Amino acid sequence: MTKITLEIPDELGEKLLGIGDRLPEFLALSLEQPPLPAKIYQYIVNFLANGPTPEEIREFRPTTEMIERLQTLLNHSKMGNLTLNEAEELAEYERIEHLIIMLKAGTLFKSEKGADE
């Protein structure tokens, strides 16, 4: 087991003393963060929770911030400078993109099917 000595503010020290022997568990959980900032997931969930119409789903786009970050990640990947965290982040963006494409394709299919009937 690794032993770590830290200097922390007294207020934080008091809070950590309250955790007691659960500190390793607490630290492990705090390090297990999703690859993307919570606001990215929140943006997508908020959109879907509002019950978008098929047209709104077709028009759904990532934010400017998301596009810029994705471009940075893709550039790092092309240059071979992608860190492990960036690779996880890029993979998560790709998973989200795949789900959105599937959602859009399903919506387009339902619209076309309804028009033919």
Image (tube, grey):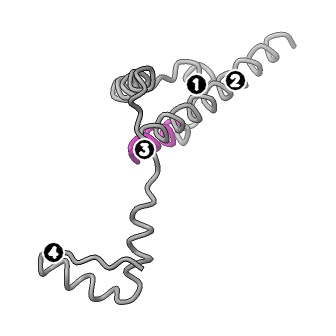
Determine contact: label 2, label 1, CB under 8 Å. yes
Q: Secondary structure at mark 2?
A: helix
| Neighbour tally class for label 4: few under 14, some 14-19, many 20 plus, Cα within 10 Å | few
In this rendered view, identify the residue nearer to me: 79 or 64. Answer: 79
Amino acid marked by disc 2: Thr
Name the N-terminal-most of marks 4 and 2. 4
**Percent from the top left, x then y, of residue 56?**
55, 23
| Closer to viewer: mark 4 or mark 2 | 4
**Percent from the top left, x then y, of residue 62?**
44, 26
State the CA–CA distance, disc 4 to disc 1: 48 Å
Amino acid marked by disc 1: Ile
State the CA–CA distance, disc 3 to disc 2: 33 Å
Dot label at residue 85: 3
In the picture of the structure, the residue carrying the numbered disc 4 is: 8
Task: Report the span colored magenta.
Answer: 37-47
The residue that appears at 37% across and 80% down in the rendered structure is 23
State the CA–CA distance, disc 4 to disc 3: 26 Å
Q: Quadrant of residue 2?
A: bottom left
- Does residue 44 show up magenta in the picture? yes
Answer above or below: position of 31 versus 107.
below
Name the N-terminal-most of marks 2 and 1. 1
Amino acid marked by disc 4: Ile
In the picture of the structure, the residue carrying the numbered disc 2 is: 107
